[in-house]
Image (cartoon, rainbow, N blue to C red):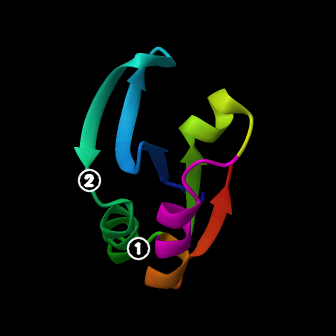
Amino acid sequence: MIIIPAVDIKNGRCVRLLQGRMDEETVFSDNPAAMAKKWESEGAEIIHVIDLDGAFKKSPQNFNSIKKIVESVDAHIQVG
């Protein structure tokens, strides 16, 4: 079995939305790259990164945060 952790990004921060609602979020970190490094240190070989702002606005919004993740880890990054 392969477990693929996710890093959801909204306004440059790692969040979890409550039932997919953009106005209901829990912030886990202000540093998505550090969160990705944490998952990699736990053994993740693939990390799924979600640009939540981009999903709702229909165009990429968190490019810089995603770029920092790609530059910070050796794990494969899947972006959605």
Residue visible at 38% across and 33% down in the picture: 16
Q: Is residue 26 above or below residue 60?
A: above
Q: Quadrant of residue 45?
A: bottom right
Q: Is residue 73 visible?
A: no
Q: Quadrant of the N terminus?
A: bottom right
Indicate left or right for 8 with 13 as reference.
Answer: right
Indicate left or right for 27 with 19 as reference.
Answer: left
Q: Choose the circle earlier in sequence order: 1 or 2.
A: 2
Indicate left or right for 50 with 35 as reference.
Answer: right
Tally of numbered tags: 2
Name of the residue lying farthest toward the right: 58
Does the magenta portion include 56? no
> Residue under circle 1?
40
Depth order, front residue of 39/18: 18
1 and 2 marks in contact (CB < 8 Å): no
Q: Nearer the viewer, mark 1 or mark 2?
A: 2
> Residue under circle 2?
30
SS at circle 1: helix
Instruction: Determine crowd level at label 1: few under 14, some 14-19, many 20+ residues with C-alpha closer than 10 A.
Output: some
Depth order, front residue of 64/48: 64
Residue visible at 40% across and 51% down in the picture: 12
Position in image of residue 75 (x %, y %): 54, 78
Q: Which residues are magenta?
A: 60-68
